[in-house]
Image (tube, grey):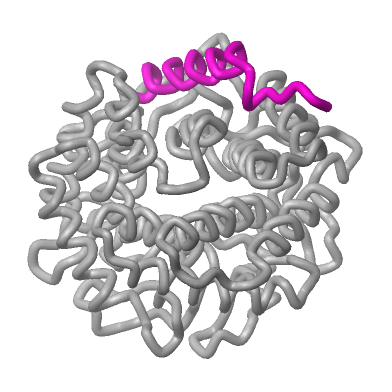
Amino acid sequence: MTHRWLDSPTHHAWLTQESLRLLDFARAARLPQGFGNLDDDGRLPRGALAETMNTARMTHSFALAHLQGVPGCLHLVEHGVAALQGPLRDAEHGGWFAHPEGQGGSGKAAYLHAFVALAASSAVMAGVAAAPALLGQAIEVIQSRFWSEEEGALRESFSRDWQQPEAYRGANSNMHGVEAFLALADVTGNPLWLERAVRMVERLILGQAANDGFRVTEHFDPHWQALPDYNRDNPADGFRPYGTTPGHAFEWARLLLHLEAALLRAEMPVPKGLLTAARGLFDSACRHAWHVDGAPGLVYTLDWRDRPVVRERLHWVHAEACATAAVLLRRTGEAQYERWYRCFWDFIGAHFIDRAHGSWHHELDPTNQPSARIWGGKPDLYHAYQALLLPRLPLAPSVACALAL
């Protein structure tokens, strides 16, 4: 296969057109205190609350759009920064709530703080005047509360006053920590963030996953002992599902190659096995999750014998699979990744893209019809939007910095 979609002007034009369509849909998510979750028709439900996760992801995404030259996005980035410095931030104890003023719970999660750091770094690159202060606040909290030098990883969560840590460690929060740390390294120029990203990768992927057939163990106790039965009674949890999550294997694979490129760019030592692990994670996820129940698409979760558990198809899983195929294709030039790249986009185009109401369906049932068992509505711009950008960008620097070059 000599002709690559990554090199096709027509394909690039399609990626651009689809990304603009997603952005237009997402603008309606603005609330006075940040950004909320849109329903299937692109409306904010009655009583909708701003969420830190969605506000950070929207701020990051609109910053990328502004850097691309999409008019009307800068004020949305400014709005997101103001929300993250205002009602979503805990002015008394530091850090960020999940909702304004701690509504619905006031715990502090590493997952959310990684996205705040990512949003702040992208807003800095977009030129938002208030963003450097937000970035400084995010860095201070990550360094003083979440980063464990002893563990070489992020602690999971704390009570509002930081006095009660959760007796749990999670791969998901550390995965997004790697993403955020890659951005922080580029924006701050401090290689310490790359060193920390390497340590997380060494623990969770080059150590744990590489020794288990490239299955990503998601759940651990505070001593990093695996918890294979975690959430067995709640297997479809949106953030901590039981078993393995192929979508995270794709994300980790992509991040390994971004890390490799970032280390080379910084002229720093590169751990052995990053490309091998990226290949292994991608191949394992495709082999065990694609079309495994008789219908096309990637299932959400697998058990420890690689059998489907939650068979719903989630949009973010397919977005990450597509982006990772593109990155592996750019890194290796191998035709197998071109085939997968086309396969995933064809599936997304046939099943996820909602041409009637806008954006993408966020979830399909096992027969590939829209459903809402895990994720209702269409709140998430971040995964799909990045999947439309990454095929056109180098592996390093990180997305906002690459767009700013």
Taken as a whole, is the magenta stretch helix, strand or loop?
Answer: helix
Quadrant position of residue 15: top right
**Quick one: which residue is furthest to the right in this view?**
294
Quadrant position of residue 280: bottom right
Q: In the image, 8: left or right of 27?
A: right
State the residue in front, 112 or 130: 130
Residue at screen point 20% across, 50% down: 100
Q: Is residue 123 above or below residue 46?
A: below
The answer to whether residue 82 shows anywhere in this view is yes
Quadrant position of residue 368: top right
Q: In the image, 184: left or right of 240?
A: left
Residue at screen point 54% across, 40% down: 375
Residue 48 at x, y percent in the picture: 30, 35
State the residue in front, 133 or 26: 133
Q: How many marks?
A: 0
Check residue 7 for magenta coloring. yes
Q: Is residue 174 above or below residue 3?
A: below
Check residue 266 for magenta coloring. no
Residue 271 at x, y percent in the picture: 58, 72
* Quadrant in the picture for the C terminus: top left
Q: Is residue 397 above or below residue 284?
A: above
Residue 256 at x, y percent in the picture: 58, 59
| Magenta span of residues | 1-26
Residue at screen point 23% across, 78% down: 144
**Quick one: which residue is furthest to the front in this view?**
267
Residue 59 at x, y percent in the picture: 28, 38
The answer to whether residue 377 shows anywhere in this view is no
* Quadrant in the picture for the N terminus: top right
Residue at screen point 43% across, 33% down: 381
Q: In the image, 10: left or right of 39?
A: right
